[in-house]
Amino acid sequence: MIIKCLLSAPILFAFTSVNAMQYQVVEMQQQRFDVIQVQQLNQLELFLKNPQTNQYYQKFSHIEKQLPACAQLKFAMNAGMYHADFQAVGLYVEKGKQKTKLNEATGVGNFFMQPNGVLAWNTQHAVVQNTAEYKQHGFKALYATQSGPMLLYKNHINPRFLPNSTSLKIRNAVGIKEQKLYFVMSQQPVSFYQLAQFFKEKLNISDALYLDGSISSLYVAESNRNDHYFKLGPIVAVVDRTRCTN
């Protein structure tokens, strides 16, 4: 069944982390979605390997433990697909250093469903673009992660998605609007089409990138949520370092 957006659907609850993000649970016709709006890009980071141990973080708690006492993990989410050894499948840039190159190969699976795309940002700007567009524009990324497929591109739902699909999973994705990033995770299993429709009709977002499904995990400090069921590859996180001194 196609889920149609109710523009009057209520926000169930909301609270704000003043410095960097806003968190809401939004309902769309009996489906609930966690929505994290990130507006201060200088507090948004990517994590994959602990530089001290060279071990993959895999868990939000492992990131939290390695942060200095002055820093606080506010939000985290799995942020792109990875191989069995936890290495990123596609482009991965951390602190301005490219760890894995842009993946333009064709293949089987969600990552290779076309168009796939890239989430990238620096302290001033963020982009969610399809892979070809990202390569062409040469964005100077401080952080970047590649995933797929694109849910929405220029306000169009990916034509490969089936409105009546019965492939339902807990899924998470990211979209961009007015230089704010919106990280979304479904609370119930949804299809690609339903998730894309939520971005398009409920959040009024025109470009959104799928991050993953089934293993989708979320950390929100203010609600004491810390999903720990799966081992993860790339992780995106808001880290408040305002109390730290150089």
Image (cartoon, helix red, strand yellow):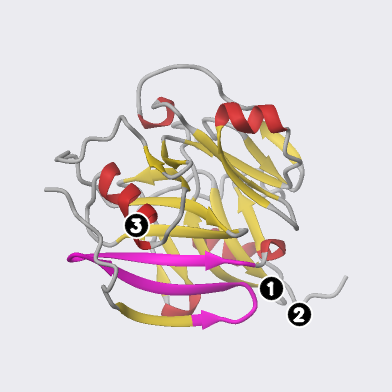
Task: Decide: is 214 above or below 64.
Answer: above
State how far apart marks 1 and 2 are (Cα).
7 Å
Q: How far apart are marks 3 and 2 (CA)?
A: 38 Å
Residue under pointer 2 = 243
Residue 207 x, y percent position in the rendering: 49, 46
Please tell me whether residue 50 is drawn above or below residue 137 in the rendered image: below
Residue linked to disc 1: 71
Residue 146 makes an appearance in the image:
yes
The reply, left or right, for residue 31 in relation to residue 60 is: left
**Total residue callouts:** 3
Q: Main secondary structure of the magenta part?
A: strand
Residue closer to the observer: 52 or 155: 155
Residue 1: image location, x then y, percent = 11, 48
Residue type at mark 1 is Ala
Mark 3 neighbour density, 10 Å: few (under 14) some (14–19) many (20 or more): some
Q: Mark 3 points at which residue?
A: 201
Q: What stretch is highlighted in magenta?
A: 16-39
Q: Does the magenta stretch include residue 19?
A: yes
Amino acid, disc 2: Arg
Task: Tell which residue pokes out farthest to the top in this image.
Answer: 106
Residue 173 percent across, percent down from the top left: 42, 50
Q: Residue 24 lies in magenta, yes or no?
A: yes
Q: Helix, strand, or loop for circle 3?
A: helix
Task: Left or right? Give the position of 99 relative to 218.
Answer: right
Distance between mark 3 and mark 1 Cα atoms: 36 Å
Q: Are marks 3 and 1 in contact (CB under 8 Å)?
A: no
Task: Give the residue type that dot 3 points to.
Answer: Glu
* Residue 182 x, y percent position in the rendering: 49, 60
The answer to whether the residue labelled 1 contacts the one labelled 2, judged by CB atoms less than 8 Å apart, is yes
Q: Which quadrant of the figure contains the C terminus? A: bottom right
